[in-house]
Amino acid sequence: MKTTPKLRRGKLLLEIIKDPERKPILRILKELIILTFIHKEFPGHYFTSYLFKEGSSNVKDYLPIKLAARIVPRLNDQRLKEVLDNKLYFDLFYRQFNIEIPLVVMYNHGKNFCRGSEVFQINSAEEFNQRLKELFELYSSLTSIIVKKIYASSKGADIYKIRKEDVLSNNHSIRDIYLSIIQSEFIFQETIIQHPKLNALNPSSVNTIRIDTLFDDEGKVNVLSAYIRMSLHNHFVDNIGSGGCMVGLDLETGVLQKYGYSDLNYDGTKRFTRHPMTETVFEGFKLPYINETIDLVTRAALLMPGLRIIGWDVAISEEGPVIIEGNSDYGIRGNDLAYGGYLAHPVLKKVLEEIHK
């Protein structure tokens, strides 16, 4: 039987009531009433930001859902969104400025494919497999390729990983991928090999850092907050909406916070202090190249002043950070949670005053 939203909400409510880490019920009710009065809306963020847990004392500092939804569209020039939303445009724009991004080896529109200056049609899965063999021969250092929609996908959807070994063995999965990608437009990129240290968190996914920047009125880029994402399972996609986990981090040191958070629809009210598969403890785990990561996203943000607030996804390779993509319309509440409440952020306070005018 398919679970309805109403049943899911009922199940989550029951989990919250049974949660041994929750605050006393009377305190939860009191805080809900106070937040409803302040924000003039039911504070759904109280649950999605885990504010019902013991230890969450600054509940007034977190963004309510409706306000959070208004911030990014209000600050960004909608005419420029295409540069980030279209992954091919993103590559063409940032490559000319020597911003570290993944190598694009091919892209397609339906059955029409482009590799460098060569344009050709692929009319069968067998021909697709042969072209992939040629691609791996041309880029001999690659062991896999990431394929994703040119236009922004959400929650890790429409992303495929093509392994060299599957191509050489004519694995049936290649046929399924071919039949899917010819229905739309996709970009083929090198797979970033993450820094060995990040394999301790999860070796199956490229564990990316989501870091957001704000271009202020004085022409300065402010890095607001950051968190790292990883799959909780043996999967190559790290997105929280696909069963992944996020852990906030200190921007000065690159050290992770104590708790990891997943989507309530996947793991209920559970918080994680260690990765369930690798057993790596989050608190105190130090990420490499944090200063270089901040420098990279700052340089990238300066090139796009019309998009004042951007959520960057950054992978850390052995050589340093690589921007996987920039998001002109991202879920800011993840960074709100990582920071500990954006309503108390000194830079965002000024921005919120603009939005309320």
Image: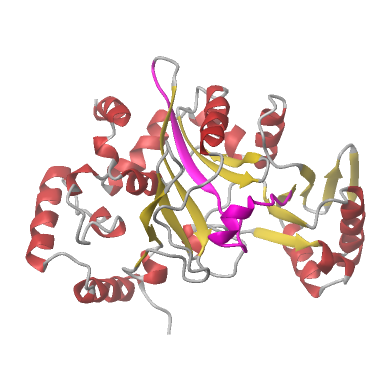
Which of the 4 image quarters holds residue 214?
A: top left
Locate the C terminus by quadrant: top left
Answer whether residue 208 is magenta in the image. Answer: yes
Q: x%, y% of residue 148?
A: 67, 53
Answer whether residue 197 is magenta in the image. Answer: yes
The residue drawn where x is 22% and y is 73% is 20
Q: x%, y% of residue 163?
A: 78, 63
What is the magenta range?
190-217
Left or right for 78, reference 344: right
Q: Nearer the viewer, residue 161 or 154?
A: 161
Left or right for 333, reference 174: left
Left or right for 113, reference 71: right
Position of 62 relative to 4 (above/below): above
Q: x%, y% of residue 102?
A: 70, 42
Residue lying furthest bottom:
1
Q: Can residue 151 be spotted in the picture?
A: no
Q: Can residue 235 be spotted in the picture?
A: yes
Q: x%, y% of residue 168?
A: 89, 67
The residue drawn where x is 34% and y is 38% is 70
The residue drawn where x is 20% and y is 67% is 22
Q: Nearer the viewer, residue 43 or 202?
A: 202
- Give the total number of marks visible in the rendering: 0
